[in-house]
Amino acid sequence: MTGRGIAAGELGAAISAAIRPWVGHDALRLVGTSPATGLGQGSFSFWHRYEEELVRSLLAHRSAHGDPCRPSALADRPAPVGIAGGTAEGTGGGTAGESSGARTAFVAGGAAAELRLLLRDGHGVWGLLGLVRAEGSRPFSADDARRAVRLGPALIALLRRHVTAGPLAPTVPALPAGLVIVAEGQGIRTVTPQARAWFDRMSGPDGPGTPGWLMPALVTALALDARENARENARENARGNARENVGGGTGGGRPFVCAPPAGFGRWLMIEAQPLDAAGEGEVAVVIQSPAGALVLPSFCDWYGLTPRERQVLELLCRGAAPKQVARVLGVSAHTVHDHLKALFRKTGAGGRDELMAAFTA
């Protein structure tokens, strides 16, 4: 179910068909990320029959009441699965009030509930599976949750294969950085022409087949993340215990997306920053083609590089020749050559030039 030239919608439908015998559902979203990026809003995603009205209803509910089944909450559970908008024994749903409010949001979008599975292994978080049942359908059960958990390793392998089967170097030209301003009420107030060009590329006939509503929804969700993080930092500062603002994570930290070329033709970064320290006002969201140093941590995750291979690659990205790499790391040139061969094998690069092209901004 991976490969070049396959639209995201087709992959979403294929993934849904493969999962349905295990856990019945009416709509699906599969979000992929890397441990270095953290979940946040994910790095790329596949959707099948997940309607715009449902996304908008859930975003509105989250803005007003929060999310009763946050990824950060799933990360704290022995089995990282939960049901938003409903409860099932053993799945650790929200409180009665949270579940009732979330059910209202799901019903407004024509759905009953969503089973959410955090995709994680010993390296960290790789994504989130969301399965939705339509209003009036049988509720998700604890057995459904257990079946979903067993799908986790296969779905992680699928996401990693999707990325590594994609292009190493950019296949589309870079666009200028674009800016989106999200207003206090979560509406998008301003989209610069450069940002509009990014939106058009994502949803256009030559893009990855992203629904036209998805990019604005992603920007809105990132703005929510930015506001929540700013408010939490303000509370921590008031207690004299400021949090370190680190990237990714399943809740908190830097609100950004770092997407690999598999879905977009080149690395893509989207980052949100509140325009006030308290997180109460507007949020600026920047869309750009990131420089090599910004994508290096995610790249190393996706291709399964060892810590030493990461060091070699980082030095190469800084312009060091293999002999300089050997000198900096205190190893022989032969050892560096072995690390280079491992890098070429894991990434599929034909040589150092092709490998470095992966980090072209």
Image: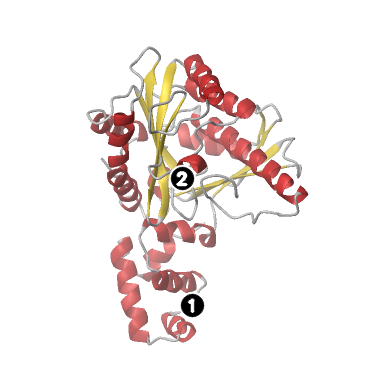
Position of 318 compared to 118: left or right?
right
Q: Which of the 4 image quarters holds residue 274?
A: top right
Q: Residue, x 50% and y 27% (percent of image)?
A: 213
User: Residue 211, labelled with which disc?
Assistant: none
SS under mark 1: loop
Amino acid type at circle 1 is: Ala
Q: The N terminus appears in which quarter of the rendering? A: top left
Report the Cα–Cα distance between label 2 and label 1: 39 Å
Position of 65 compared to 148: left or right?
right
The residue carrying mark 1 is 320
From this view, report whether residue 246 is shown above or below residue 331: above
Amino acid type at circle 2 is: Ala
SS under mark 2: helix
Q: Nearer the viewer, residue 170 or 121?
A: 121
User: Residue 75, labelled with which disc?
Assistant: 2
Position of 190 compared to 38: left or right?
right
Pair 2/1: label in front:
2
x then y, percent, for residue 203: 46, 32
Q: Nearer the viewer, residue 318 or 302?
A: 302
Q: Residue, x 44% and y 21% (percent of image)?
A: 51
